[in-house]
Amino acid sequence: MKGDMEREKRTFKQEMKDDSNLRRLAVVVRDSNDAVTVQDFTSRILAWNLGAERMYGYTEKEALGMNVLDLVPQECREENRRMLAGLAKGEPVTSFETRRLTKDGRVLDVWLIVTTLPDEEGRIRAFSTTERDITERKRKEQELIIANKELAFQNREKEKRADELIIANKELIYQNEEKEKRAEELKKAVADLRRSNEELQQSRDALKASEALLPAAIDILPVGLWIIDAEGKIVTSSAAAQRIWAGVRYVGIDQLGEYKGWRTDSGKPIEAHEWAGARALEKGETTIEQEVEIVCFDGTHKIILDSAVPLRRSDGSIGGAVTINQDITERRRAEEALHLANAYNRSLIEASLDPLVTIGRDGKITDVNAATEKVTGYSRQDLVGNDFLEYFLEPEKARAGYQRVFKEGCVVDYPLEIRHKDGRITSVLYNASVYRDEKGEVSGVFAAARDITERKRAEEALRRAVADLKRSNEELQQFAYVASHDLQEPLRAVASFTQLLSERYKGKLDKDADEFIAFAVGGANRMQTLINDLLSYSRLETRGKPPEPVDSHDALGRALANLGTAIRESGALVTNDDLPKVLADESQLAQLFQNLVGNAVKFHGKEPPRVHVSAVSQGNEWLFSVRDNGIGIAQEYHERIFSIFQRLHSREEYPGTGIGLALCKRIVERHGGTIRVESEPGSGSTFFFTLPKP
């Protein structure tokens, strides 16, 4: 066998020397940055360029004659075998993406191009591969995907802020409308007061004739009234005026500074000549309801409307003035409280992400929030006044729910579907109740809709996931059957015959033959171990027993008995504290201890292994720890080591299949616990896992 391989190498090299074009091509291939190899159909490497040395770490001397499967990860070997089978049948194979292993154990993503190499008679005896490392490119593609997701998230945030600005703008428009309404009311009030002033002027003579009745008439007025004579002195005031100010000062207008107040709109103090009465007397101005905050003579504060009109003689000259004060303190407090309550309620309504709507007894919409506008696609102006049934996919079902609210007083989680203006459908759950007027009569319905579109999608996704999981479990069961029956038997035959070859012909053939037979025996044994480990991994759920109270000390004892040979050969010392009872599958708990302690014994440094097992109470769980003095694990591998087939060392350094810790993780998670590791290279490792208390 070795002679055939050497002849093929010499033939290939001789052909390269015999053709000048091929020699030039060989130089290009040799210096290429891509890995270029030549292989035969037994997967032996016949040629190996500098690019392959740089990419995989093997020198040409090391690589020639090596089985290419040593460069192929376990999960890609079937793919490699299918490629060889296809080439052998003459099927075209051009290029494909796959993965390869370097000498130091790294896994590379590569793009592989296959070219068949016919001999002089046209027979395909070998083929070449050109392999390019695309690991970095794939990493950058993944980073680009993550960056795009982040950009999409930022765009959604910007859209959200834009929606908030729209809501704030609508509120500002509403406030401006209220101010315009108030201005119209004030204009009307001014007109009414002007008309009253004219009527007062016309009745001046009648007023003089009835001066004897004036004091009594003044005292029955609900507002405070002051009369100022032509000299500018307060000559009389009503009882209400004295109540408002908690007293009275009969002073001239130049002494009105004794009356303290300031404008509510500007906060500016009012000077003596700025009171409405003073302006009426001095300038002939009529003042209507100037709002003022005053300090009464007893020190209390009130808000009044200060109005005044001049009293004119028949010749038009000013003969005095009348001032009216109306106490609106309580009204203003009530208005402010109502305004705050309305603003608060509205802000709550608009802040809600759920559509909110009020509906009258006639079925017409009376108010909506911004969420309703969004889910229907119509503005508040378009929605108010329309029949609420128009916006549902099933109007009659919506009507039935509406009538049920009037009958029962409320409905909870009533399923409906809202139709958007553009045809989109939103699934919602409605919660609604009646609301009443001040007389206690039912005025309409207040309804809130909760968007359950995402929930329904999640439920559907969960249903599909459960179905997929069920199918996956069935496939896993099938795999377990195949692994335990169909694969084991031929593998045992291969192992038996290769072992027989080793025993019968060892030393009788050349050194290479002995080595090849040893490789075959070792490979068959490793395959048997791998299949058994996979079988154990797949049967964790199906062959596992229901958890029951188990003495973890006994389980550790079973594990140490199974590891007896390895412990003695390595000189290991395994100690433990008192260990508790836990709720577990005893067989799987023993397997868990066996894997963790076995790893501690296997991955040790120059010193003999030292392993200690302990447990501490942690709420409803026990926290176990398995501490060793081994070679340790780098931080970046603390998560990776719990994945199946993840090895940090070559089989030559430390034997194994890379399934042990994955099996530990699955056992712990089956019991509802967690597992992790704390370690640094050269400082040993401590594995922590939790199990429930009985």
Image: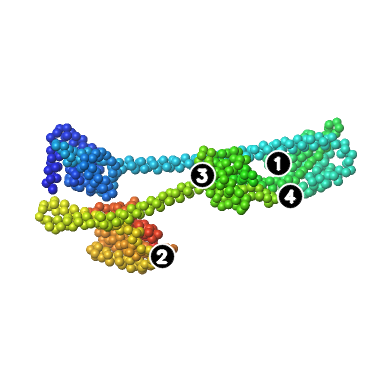
Identify which residue is drawn at 17% across, 41% down.
125
In the displayed structure, does residue 285 sit left or right of residue 519? right
Residue kind at label 2, given as amino acid type = Lys
At which x and y percent is residue 264? 69, 42
- Mark carried by residue 263: 1
Residue kind at label 4, given as amino acid type = Gly
Asked if residue 585 can be seen in this view, the reply is: yes
Q: Tell me the residue that label 3 is attached to.
A: 426
Q: Secondary structure at mark 3?
A: strand
Quick one: label 4 or label 2, which is nearer the N terminus? Answer: 4
At which x and y percent is residue 440? 68, 51
Quick one: label 4 or label 1, which is nearer the N terminus? Answer: 1
Quick one: label 1 or label 2, which is nearer the N terminus? Answer: 1
**In the image as oriented, which residue stretches furthest toward the left?**
508
Q: Tell me the residue that label 4 is attached to.
A: 299
Q: CA distance from mark 1 to mark 2?
A: 74 Å
Identify which residue is drawn at 77% across, 37% down.
193
Other-residue count near label 4 (Cα within 10 Å), few / some / many at <14 / 14–19 / ≥20: few
Quick one: label 3 or label 2, which is nearer the N terminus? Answer: 3
